[in-house]
Amino acid sequence: FMVSRRTCVAVGEVFIWCCSWRVVDCMVLAAAADPLSRFGVYAAVTLTSLVFYGKSRAAKLLRKMGFAQRSVNFGVAVALMAGSWGMIDAVVAKIAHEDRIRMMLWHMVFVALGLLVCAFNQGFQAERFLDQLVEELTRQL
């Protein structure tokens, strides 16, 4: 049984993304217990990442730093995605009164809404959107 190099790289990337994302989650959970407080901390994480991502002096300086810049860009991407997801999760937790089953159902509602928005953006060609999504997620396997 041989695993291709591309598959190993893809699994490694998923592992790095998930673990990095979870670091942000653990920091937020250590800082805030209730959903509204978590929302605020996740919003701060997201806004901070947007400042670094944007056209600030710090961003311009970091663009000149090669590998260090790529590392910071990765950190910014992780913070942006973890912060965005965390805000959604905090809203869901508040709406569902932190009941895990209700949270799962509310997340499913948000997935359906997201799919509708993306389908609308793609001219209601849902199969085209799903093809692009799956292709992007599996392009390295």
Image (cartoon, rainbow, N blue to C red):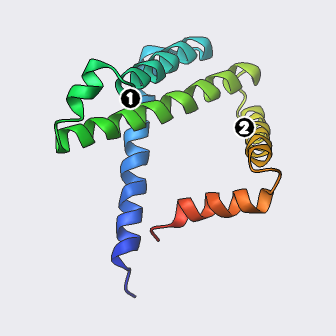
Type of the residue with mark 1: Tyr
Percent across and percent down for residue 37 are: 55, 11
User: Which secondary structure lies at badge 1?
Assistant: helix
**Looking at the rendering, which quadrant does residue 86 occupy?**
top right
Percent across and percent down for residue 15 are: 39, 54
Percent across and percent down for residue 8 are: 36, 69
State how far apart marks 2 and 1 are (Cα). Answer: 27 Å
Q: Is residue 38 left or right of residue 53?
A: right
**Looking at the rendering, which quadrant does residue 20 occupy?**
top left
Callout 1: 10 Å neighbours few (<14), some, many (20+)? some
Q: Residue at x 22, y 31 (%)?
A: 62
Dot placed on the residue nearer the N-terminal end, 2 or 1: 1
Q: Write down the residue under mark 1.
A: 53
Which of discs 2 and 1 lies nearer the camera? The answer is 1
| The N terminus - image quarter | bottom left
Q: Write down the residue under mark 2.
A: 107
